[in-house]
Image (cartoon, rainbow, N blue to C red):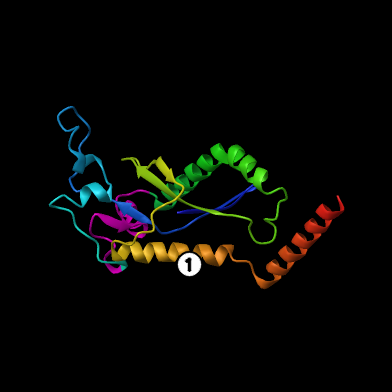
Amino acid sequence: YVLVTSMTPLRCFLFPEGLARFASEAYEKVTTSNLEKKFMHLTNYSVNQHHEAYEANTGMESADVGSKRSLHFVREWLAQQGFDAAAVWLEIEKVVVKTLLAVQPHVAHTYRSCLRENRDCVGFSCFDLLGFDILLDDKGKPWIIEVNEMPSFDTAAPIDHAVKSAVVAETLAMICPTLEEARLLSALSSSTQQKDQEG
């Protein structure tokens, strides 16, 4: 999950925890004979929940089992397999930033069309909480599958509730202005309204 609080300048925050989804069947390289094996090639919950080997996760205390696991588990697994988990996370950060930079001009233009003045210095005029779907290949390289502008906050499993409620709580803590910021924003707003009336 990535919280974007500004596009000009770009300001984003990557939540350190998330959900990792696993296929119900062991992966094999794609061939014409296994191309149709959706339980091997897809990790979607909506697909895998119908497989006989689908294993539901019961919560963060068992985030190392099941078809849906925590990013904490993934980091530990990567380290156990000989990967530099911190380096993999850094590469994930890089692809997130590059993806946001690719859309920054368009989003910044749209933002400025709606809000003439930059008020992001005190509180936020708007924010976006994005869900990045990232695939790690066998070398630990991250690949962006898609970016969800409106990620699901459905809590079908206890692990969903644990991760998603923490994301929402952290987001609210970051975007809610302090009392001092609220006063500055109010003063800035009054000043802008006065200029509009005079001009």
Image height of 20 relative to 167, above or below:
above
**Quadrant housing residue 122:** bottom right
Q: Is residue 74 magenta?
A: yes
Residue appearing at x 12%, y 52% in the figure:
52
Query: What is the three-letter code of the residue carrying label 1?
Result: Ala
The one nearer the camera, 185 or 143, is 185
Residues shaded magenta: 61-83
Query: Residue 83: where, in percent of width, then height?
Result: 35, 48
From the viewer's perspective, tell me whether residue 139 is left or right of residue 55. right
Please state the horizontal and vertical placement of residue 77, each as a whole percent of the image. 30, 54
The location of residue 58, given as percent across then percent down, is 25, 66
Q: Which residue is mark 1?
A: 169
**SS at circle 1:** helix
The residue lying at 29 percent from left, 61 percent from top is 156
Q: Nearer the viewer, residue 61 or 110?
A: 110
Q: Residues within 10 Å of mark 1 (few under 14, many from 20)?
A: few
The extreme left residue here reads 52
